[in-house]
Image (cartoon, grey):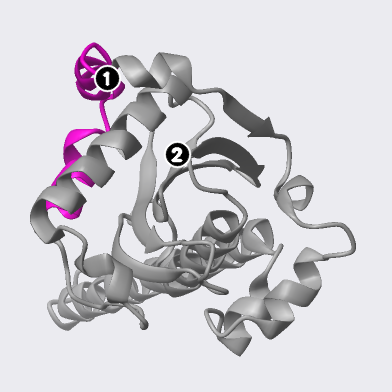
Amino acid sequence: MKITALLVLKAAPETSDPVILANASDVSHFGYFQRSSVKEFVVFVGRTVASRTPPSQRQSVQHEEYKVHAYNRNGLCAVGFMDDHYPVRSAFSLLNQVIDEYQKSFGEAWRSAKEDSSQPWPYLAEALTKFQDPAEADKLLKIQRELDETKIILHKTIDSVLARGEKLDSLVEKSSDLSMASQINRGELSHARRLEAVARYCWDVLQASKENELMLHNSVSCNSGWMSWGYI
């Protein structure tokens, strides 16, 4: 079970594009050359889902190997990227806690936010690590009675969250969250992994060749020594 990212956004009805208030991610399980693109897609997908999660609603969206969970509490929205094995109710228990902690730390200051924040929020990074174990989130669940009273809307794909006529491809093209490299790489993660595997293989072959060359050099040097002594 894995949490890849947690985000907090201003997603009030009067906000056309959600504003990112805090963002923490762990992309260490991705290949080195994929990590920047993965972070950009986390921001893009998180913003897309948050903008389509009305106040007082919880919803889960399947996107590739992730489940993207979003909870909008009166315009303050928490979004989590978990794998399929992370329990849904534990995920929403965590998002509820994240919003509680954000309001304790910053009050209502988020309502005036107009631009994405790049300032780290230590609690979010700590939560990303602590709640990798769903059992920790389950402890929160016991004291969050209101979670049982709210229906969680489940979507099989991110396309089902989009408004009629909207296409994910067109959103990708218009998004300022994605660099050109990330747009080109969209949908090619498996291909990127294969390329990385090939690169790793080539590196191993190169290292093996250097080792063989060194062994051959040592062997030749050794044989030359024996020849000079008349043993060969």
* Helix, strand or loop for disc 1: loop
Depth check, mark 2 against mark 1: the one in front is: 1
Q: Is residue 166 magenta?
A: no
Does residue 149 lie above or below 203 as drawn?
Answer: above
The one nearer the camera, 88 or 17, is 17
Q: Which three-letter amino acid code belongs to the residue tagged 1?
A: Gln
Q: Position of residue 131 (x, y in %)?
A: 23, 33
Per the rendered image, the range of residues in magenta is 123-144
Q: Residue at x 35, y 75 (%)?
A: 210
The majority secondary structure of the magenta stretch comes to: helix
Name the side, left or right, on which 29 lies relative to 99: right
State the image quarter where residue 24 is shown. Answer: bottom left
Q: Which three-letter amino acid code belongs to the residue tagged 2?
A: Met
Quadrant where the N terminus is found in the figure: top left
Q: Position of residue 188 (x, y in %)?
A: 69, 64
Does residue 119 lie above or below 96 as drawn?
Answer: below
Mark sitting on residue 158: none
Name the side, left or right, on which 143 lies relative to 114: left
Residue labelled with disc 1: 144
Q: Are marks 2 and 1 in contact (CB under 8 Å)?
A: no
Residue labelled with disc 2: 82
Q: Earlier in the sequence, mark 2 or mark 1?
A: 2
Name the side, left or right, on which 64 lies relative to 26: right
The one nearer the camera, 179 or 108, is 108
Q: Residue at x 54, y 62 (%)?
A: 13
The one nearer the camera, 144 or 121, is 144
